[in-house]
Amino acid sequence: MTSREIVKRAISFATPPRLPVLIGELGMCDTAYVPRLKPPSSAAQESGIDEWGCRWGHTDVKNMGQVVGHPLEDIRGLDRHPCPDYTDDCCYLDAGEALDTIAAQGKYALAGIFMVLFERMHALHGFENTLVDLYEDRPAMEALADCIVERHVTLVKEMTRRFPGRIDGWCMTDDWGTQQAAFISIDRWMDFFFPRYKRIFDAMHEAGCDVWVHSCGKVNEIIEGYIQAGVNVVNLQQPRALGIAEIGARYRGRICFETLADIQVTLPSGRRDRVEEDAEALMTCWATPEGGLLLSDYGDNEAIGVTDSGIKRDMYDAFSQWSQRLYGNPLPPLPAPAVGPARE
C-alpha cells in the first residue's frame, strides 16, 4: 500500500495498515508539499515583505519571525491595497513537475495556504486592531475577511483546475488560542468566522481535497467549529495544554488528529519516559483502530528548545510500538542518523 493510500485511510477512518508519519527531519514522510510561487504582481518582490504586503521581522528568540509592519492598520485603505493575484499562471510553474515526482513516490500531495483567515486579518490590520474592530467596526472586518476569503477560494480553484484530481489535501494555518482559551468566544467565532471558513473548505471539498488546519493554543471549543465547517485533519502540537483526555472524549472518531509529543513540555525535556507517556495517551485517547491520527513534527528544534535531536527518534520508536499494537504493523525503519555527538 502506498503512502498516499495509508494517509487517506487514516483520515477517512478506513483502517490503515500502520500509523502515517510526517517527519521530514527523520527522513520519513508519507506526504509531500506542492510548491506554489508568489504572484509576480505581488509586493513580495521586496525582501521581508510577503505576498499580501506584510513586513516580517525577527525577535531575539530563534523562530519563524513575526509581522512587524501591518499595511492596513488604517482599514480605510483596503480598496486600494494590492492583493495577490492567484490567477497568474506564473504561480504554478513548479507545481506540475513536483506533482509528477509526488505521484511517482506514491505520496499524498498537500497544497498549502499560510495564514488562511484570522491570522491574515491581523497580519494586515494588526492583532489588537482586529480584535477591537470585530466588536467596534464589524462592517470593516467583514470587508477585510471577505477579501481574504475571495482570494483564497480563487487560489484553490485555480490550482485544482490546473491539476485536477492530483492534489489530495490543503493544509492551512490559523492560530486561535492562548494557553487558557481562544481569543474570542465560540459564539462570536461561529457567527463571524464559521461561514467564511466553510466557504473556503467547501471549495476544497468540491475539488475532491481533504482539509487540514493547524491551530495552536487551547482551542478546545473551536475544534467543534472546525468539524462542522468540514475540516478533516486538525494539527495540534500542544496536546497537554489542550488536555489529552478531554479532547479525546469530545472528538475521538469525529476528526483526524495530526499531532506529536507535546512541543512545550515533553520534547524540550529530552526525557524518553515523558515521550512514551504522550505516545500512550495520544494513541489511546485520540487514535482509533480505524484510524484518526497522523504522527507529525515541529520542524524547528531550536525554536521549541529541543537540544537533543535524538528525542525525535525516541518519539518515533514509541509511536511505532503503538502502531504495531493498534494496526498490526510498526512504522518503517528510519535511515541511519548522521554521525554527531554521542547522547548522554
Image (spheres, rainbow, N blue to C red):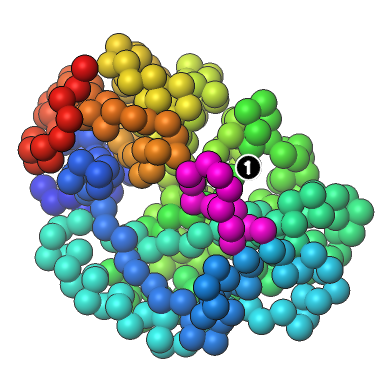
User: Residue 280: x percent and y percent?
Assistant: 31, 16
- Residue in the picture at 20% in, 64% down: 102
- Is 129 included in the stretch rendered in magenta? no
Pick the front one: 185 or 118: 118
From this view, report whether residue 85 is shown above or below residue 193: below
User: Residue 298: x percent and y percent?
Assistant: 38, 40
Look at the magenta stretch and give its main secondary structure: loop
Specify whether residue 292 is in view. no
User: Residue 254: x percent and y percent?
Assistant: 45, 35
How many marks are shown on the rendered structure?
Answer: 1
Check the picture and name the quadrant holding the C terminus. top left
- Residue in the picture at 11% in, 37% down: 339
- Is 59 included in the stretch rendered in magenta? yes
From this view, report whether residue 318 is shown above or below residue 114: above
Horizontal arrangement in the rendering, residue 97 relative to residue 266 (left or right): left
Specify whether residue 244 is in view. yes
Horizontal arrangement in the rendering, residue 150 relative to residue 93 (left or right): right
User: Residue 341: x percent and y percent?
Assistant: 17, 30
Q: Quadrant of residue 151?
A: bottom right
Quickly name the residue at label 1: 176
Q: Which residues are magenta?
A: 56-68
Residue kind at label 1, given as amino acid type? Trp
Pick the front one: 300 or 92: 300
- Residue in the picture at 51% in, 66% down: 203
Q: Quadrant of residue 68?
A: bottom right
Could you tell me which secondary element the residue under label 1 belongs to?
loop
Pick the front one: 183 or 264: 264
Horizontal arrangement in the rendering, residue 8 relative to residue 243 (left or right): left
Identify the residue at the far right of this view.
136
- Residue in the picture at 45% in, 39% down: 303
Neighbours of disc 1 within 10 Å: few (<14), some (14-19), many (20+): some
